[in-house]
Amino acid sequence: METLLFLVDGRTPNQLRPLTCSRNVLNRIHGSASWSQGDTKVVAAIYGPKSGTKKGENLEKACIEVIWKPKTGQSGKPEKEYEMILRRTLQSICLLNIHPNTTTSVIVRVVNDDDALLPCAINASCAALVDVGIPLNHLAVAICCGVVESGFVILDPSKIEEQKMKAFVHLVFPNSVLSVLPEESLHVGDEAKEHGLISSVTHGRMSVDDYLHCLERGRAASAKLSAFLRKNLQSQVPSNT
């Protein structure tokens, strides 16, 4: 069980770091949310939908714009890659035909980075979309899976733990939430949407078996993330009674 030594906080390789999520955390904007996994924290702010889209966008659909703000310094190549992945992910879960020829801006600000930054940003952005009331096909949850030299998979690694990994992958899974999507829409054919995969981004070299192992472990972890997100969003819905 030498892989347990990689987890400096004492958790097992199957355990996620502590999760926190809060909505409506910023003033004077349309919607916002913060998301933390361990010491990694991201705040997502939503502006829009506002009229008009950028040149080259489809006027018959809504446009999603993502701006990534690092904790310090200027945005570089990694941040631009994060913007692209996050934009594509959010476009895949939003109902883009409901508000055509509009732009929704998603501003992601890094508060602290202890790895798994992109999954935290995706999770925060999804919660912020719910906060502002953007129409969605479904939500999404993201997780990082790291692989050590022995092939063992560790969920949600910190920066110190990641340094001992040979590779890691960011996985994004659909999270169908009943308050957002009617129950009859939760299935495509005979397969529940939770069984799908929205996006996958790998870093380092891993075998096919390593990847499939990450996919299996990541999908299991996504169920825990989905339950946490669902409970959190429902607990923050104001009551009219």
Image: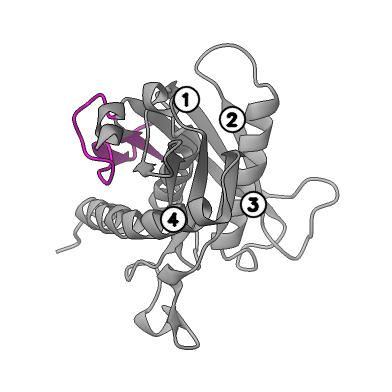
Q: Is residue 72 left or right of residue 239?
A: right
C-alpha span from label 4 to label 1: 30 Å
Q: Horizontal and vertical percent for residue 36? A: 33, 34
Where 191 sits versus 226, above or below? below
Q: Amino acid at mark 1?
A: Val
Label placed on residue 110: 1
C-alpha span from label 4 to label 3: 25 Å
- Lower sequence index among marks 2 and 1: 2
Label placed on residue 88: 3
C-alpha span from label 2 to label 1: 8 Å
**Residue under the image location 42 percent in, 38 percent down:** 120
- Lower sequence index among marks 4 and 1: 1
Q: Quadrant of the C terminus?
A: bottom left
Tell me where the magenta segment starts and ends, as one range.
7-36
- Lower sequence index among marks 3 and 2: 2
Name the residue tied to disc 4: 213
Q: Horizontal and vertical percent for residue 57? A: 80, 53
Q: Nearer the viewer, mark 4 or mark 3?
A: 4
C-alpha span from label 4 to label 2: 31 Å
Q: Amino acid at mark 2?
A: Trp
**Residue under the image location 67 percent in, 58 percent down:** 62
